Image: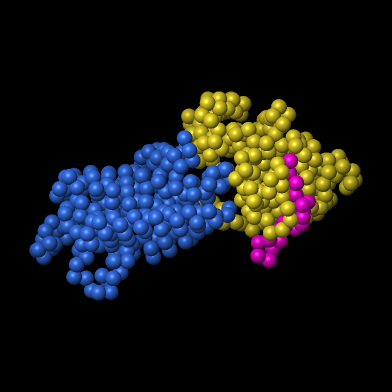
Amino acid sequence: MNAVYILWLREMRRYLRSRAQIVASLGQPALYLVALGFGLGPVFKKAGEGSYLQFVAPGVIAMTVLFSSIFSGIGLLWDRQFGFLKETLVAPVPRIQIMIGRTLGTATVAVIQGLLVVIVCFVAGFRVANLARAPLALLFMGLIACLFSALGTAIGSVLENMQGFQLVMNFLVMPIFFLSGALYPLHNLPKMFALVTQIDPLSYGVDGLRTMLIGASHFGGALDALVLAGIAVMLLAVGSYLFSRIQV
Amino acid sequence: MIHVNELVKRFGAVTAVDHISFDVAEGEMFAFLGPNGAGKTTTIKMLTTLLQPDGGTLQVDGLDPARHAHDVRKRFGIVFQDPSLDGELTAQENMELHGVFYHVPRKTRLDRTEELLRLFGLWEKRNQQVKFFSGGMKRRLEIARALLHTPKILFLDEPTLGLDPQTRNQMWTQVKNLNQSERVTVFLTTHYMDEADRMAQRLAIIDHGKIVAQGTPQELKQKTSTTSLEDAFLALTGSKIRDEAAGSADQMRQFARMWSTRR
């Protein structure tokens, strides 16, 4: 057993023990599915875009993975507050291993949360277009989770208190979600707006999930995977660097 | 075992530790005393690789913590001023996590966990989540955890803060036994002078970042013509109440308390 595995296991144990939190975290995605899926469904259909529920479900799954992974990453703040961070920082373990263990743990939790929302989507009436490509959707969920867990850890390494948390929420997480095309199609957007959506890494995650789940693609599945993997590696490197500089 | 020479640490314009020097011998119980904000925890953080000094030299078991952090970390166990356990995990899981961090082989880890949890009266509670433990139980678990990898040095930063006299007495008895049976060098800080008087073979008093006196408890009492260590301490550091700025961790705790009260 090594440090990476034991830290991954820690995240799993903590997640599985917070049953109320698991159930509560399904509320927001379910609301998006019901309110938007059924509320905007008729308008979307009238515009000739097909079923909105089918369209929005991959976006809601991506949203769940985004929120879960980034907040778990920022959970580093709570480890700082409750002192556990110090236990890890004085241990004879390279900090890169601590960072990787944490990131893999939080990413796994985010993917599990995403899978639970997939079930909610099925209950709401969502159907996968091509079952053979469905496992690849899992790969995209994993990539989104790794990318944003690393981003969360990087942010958690820099933030020293909860005052910055609201800033992160309002000026980073929400824009990442709303500008990703999770709720609307990316074609025919105004030029500047289209450019912004292309910079947003979640756009590629949502597009990848749509490609694999409903067979509709904007950027192309291969480009989606490449961009997500590239940014995830870059953020892991940045997160590791910032984590290595933490002083308590 | 510990050699500190002209150690300096600055935070902006504030010199938290100002050219201090002292030595701690192998197997010794050494108390590092001082008022709030005197520089005790900053010194411990430098000794335990959490902070880099700005000047002077440090040696822990012959190694410089700044240059050989990884090797130094294997040699000590630490009980921090604030709890550092994972409350969501059980006592046994906290021990397991620590054992893996310190590369303790599985068999040794399990045996030693049982031995230490029994010693500290926590074996029956090993499968209970730590968040349900009392303050005293958490402290005992932290000491047990710090000893899991059989460190050569044990740093105890105000380990008895907030504990009742019974728990304090029990805890110090166990630390003393370990010091004698396993020859663990103990470096402790405390605000309870009676504890320092009873436990420490030698001590140093730090105030405003400078060491104002060091020696045996008896020597300090003689030097200040007092009868108790508390009086000696007050004679050396004055009786003015000290303020300590809240660090980011303190601010986080205040926020968490506020948040939990609102709920």
Q: Between residues B157 and B54, which one lies in front from this camera angle?
A: B54
**What residue appears at the point 78 percent right and 48 percent down from the top-left corner?**
B22
Res A43 visible: yes
Q: Is residue B123 above or below residue A143?
A: above
- For chain A, give the colour: blue
Q: Between residues A241 and B30, which one lies in front from this camera angle?
A: A241
**What residue appears at the point 72 percent right and 58 percent down from the top-left corner?**
B55
Left or right: residue B77 versus residue A219 is right
Q: Between residues B37 and B57, which one lies in front from this camera angle?
A: B57
Question: Residue A56: x percent and y percent?
Answer: 21, 56
* Residue B10 lies in the magenta-colored region: yes
Q: Quadrant of the N terminus of chain B?
A: top right
Look at the magenta stretch and give its main secondary structure. strand
Question: Residue B145: x percent and y percent?
Answer: 58, 35
**What residue appears at the point 47 percent right and 61 percent down from the top-left corner?**
A164
**What residue appears at the point 20 percent right and 55 percent down from the top-left corner?**
A211
